[in-house]
Image (tube, coloured by chain):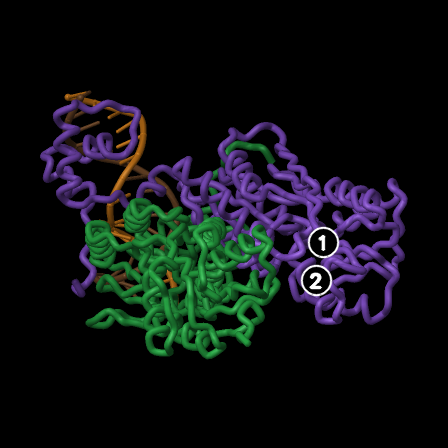
Chain colours: A green, B purple, C orange, D brown
Amino acid sequence: MVDQAVPSATLMDVARLAGVSLATASRSLNGSTRQVGEDLRRRVVLAAVELNYTANAQAQAMARGRTDVVGLLVHDIADPYFSSIAAGVMRAAEDHGLLVTMASTLRRPESELDYVAALRGQRARAVVLAGSRVDDPEMLRRLGSELASFEATGGRAVMISQKKLPVDTVLLENRAGAKALAESLVGLGHRRFAVLSGPRDLLTSRDRLAGFQSGLAAAGGELDPRNVLQDSFTRDGGLSAMTRLLDQGTDATCVFAANDVMAVGAMAALRQQGIGLPGRIAVAGFDDILTLRDITPGLTTVRLPLEEVGAAAIDLVLQPRGDRPRVRRVKGQVVLRDSTPPLT
Amino acid sequence: MVDQAVPSATLMDVARLAGVSLATASRSLNGSTRQVGEDLRRRVVLAAVELNYTANAQAQAMARGRTDVVGLLVHDIADPYFSSIAAGVMRAAEDHGLLVTMASTLRRPESELDYVAALRGQRARAVVLAGSRVDDPEMLRRLGSELASFEATGGRAVMISQKKLPVDTVLLENRAGAKALAESLVGLGHRRFAVLSGPRDLLTSRDRLAGFQSGLAAAGGELDPRNVLQDSFTRDGGLSAMTRLLDQGTDATCVFAANDVMAVGAMAALRQQGIGLPGRIAVAGFDDILTLRDITPGLTTVRLPLEEVGAAAIDLVLQPRGDRPRVRRVKGQVVLRDSTPPLT
DNA sequence: CTGTTAGCGCCTTCAA
DNA sequence: TTGAAGGCGCTAACAG
């Protein structure tokens, strides 16, 4: 059991044992359009089982020119937003016999570039980039160029988030979702709002803020610029931003955090300051993260069907490439819960 | 931009452009022990950049015999338990230049077998199996045999959970953790307990139950067998089990759910039945899932350093193989929070 | 239907 | 230090 590495059985071993040629063995074992006589085929299969043969995927890929690997790049797999997307990608990939290779870029755009290059080296079938783009023209240009190389050599690229580059995209309608949320909140009686936004250069966060603002404008809510605080797109970011908001004093009756994990941080901040929930300040988030559906009070949010989003990305990968990049729009749905009771 | 696939630059293209031999190009571009004259090397590198060259990983792997890919198999990536482990694996892997390929087995042991075989085909450097073993001797035997094949051809296998097979293992001390938790809870004044356990054949769940029982025995708590309910290892399983417990009536003052997500489901059940929290029934979980740290009341649990566990697995992958499988023990730490107030 | 053979791109002896 | 050449395992023409 602790022997040195023994080379595994090759197709030639199988062919020899079955007494057939390499080609016949190949044709009967690994998918080929060509037919093989039933008796020979049986002998080959038996021999393969006997030798515990497994095709060398590297060699297959080399001969065929491309692999069945799909690279998935996420900002942070420990973030439930991305793990949900990943689950969808992996489920759909499995259904179609694709292997998923995954990497966490830890929000470093540089990392994304490196991984795309690595995937090109792997001759990956496709790369799926999940996660918000950042407002950095130079970075975007470099990514675009890297993806162009990737596609030029026959790979497919799919982005999940904003449509910023000429590649297939699953476009998340953050703006429309946030707008609808704002309108609902005004409908509950709120007039003065605050927003805990993510980093200024993160487009997802920016879109949600812009959508929220336009919803307020349409429905008649107010958002004092001093009530818009930026912080990191995490639970701790929400905690910190909310704390600052309370410290500086605010007359807002409702706080919109740009995603659910920030909202949870905001709720923690309220509790730390002895402000009950639901109470003086209502809180809403965005995403409807499954794991957070049981927090109390229930968090009002905009539901994004994240697993479906992941599956949609794989679906795009499988579509034959058209003459123009495809865009799949996914909209969010407002879900009102107890964290935003009607203002009486 | 929408051209047909153009073969990417090969090492030969680079060599030709640099006016050197293939061997020299190889030696100066991709790590080799042999030296190359500084001037030639420079020319080669320049040519590579010029052509946007990236080594074909498949071809390299074929020539070298093995890849830098580590396969990670989890039960369900959307479960925060596994996404935390995955985060640790990916972080550590990146630090060592390893690529992570990941698959969700959706708790089907058969799937695990298939993936290990696929990874053997990929000539993966290693496979990491995260997730509880199941009590099924036949399945275990087949997995053992598959892993043996994998290791026989030079790969490394690491399991995270129980030590059930002769491979390197990161062993989670579920039993000891649950025992310590039981003792702490008795220390808070509880005497009569209930346990919401996972599927009977899931060893992690079983170990936690056994550890909890032994802790009660040592500290003087009681666990009526009728107060031990099985259900799936998920939030909904916890909800369902807790509901059944309440329906059948119970005199327990404290409920131990075999993991945090079940505990959250249990809390939801209590709320549904109008039982406040914290209140008549205390609730404790296991894992200390980061995303759940903000639920109210704070959930008493046993903290497992899941990211470190993932990193430890990669560390084992990198260790030279010894004559006997290595075992890395990881213990849990009891964290008391408001969901289990002292019983007055 | 079956067999033969030429690569796929790279690494690595072996010679020079 | 550099170059030439064999082979890694498999697929896909091309013959038979």
Q: Secondary structure at mark 2?
A: helix
Give the mark, 2 or 1, whose residue is nearer the N terminus: 2
| Residue sitting nearer the eye, A314 or A237 | A237
Q: Quarter of the image for the C terminus of chain A: give it.
A: bottom right
Q: Are marks 2 and 1 in contact (CB under 8 Å)?
A: yes
| Image disc number at residue A305 | none
Residue at image position (36%, 42%) is: B61
**Which-is-in-front pick, marks 2 and 1?**
1
Looking at the picture, do discs 2 and 1 lie on one chain?
yes
Q: How many marks?
A: 2
| Image disc number at residue B339 | 1
| Residue sitting nearer the eye, B104 or A232 | A232
Q: Secondary structure at mark 1?
A: loop
Measuring from the top left, give residue A265's x and y in whole percent.
51, 54
Instruction: Identify residue type, mark 1.
Output: Ser
Residue corresponding to mark 2:
B267
| Residue sitting nearer the eye, B39 or B242 | B242
| Residue sitting nearer the eye, A154 or A276 | A276
Residue at image position (12%, 25%) is: B39
Left or right of A216 on screen, residue B9 = left
Q: CA distance from mark 2 to mark 1?
A: 9 Å
Measuring from the top left, give residue A51's x and y in whole percent.
53, 49
Left or right of A33 on screen, residue A3 = right
Q: Is the residue A179 above or below the residue B207 in the image?
A: below
Task: Name which quarter of the figure residue B40 lies in.
Answer: top left
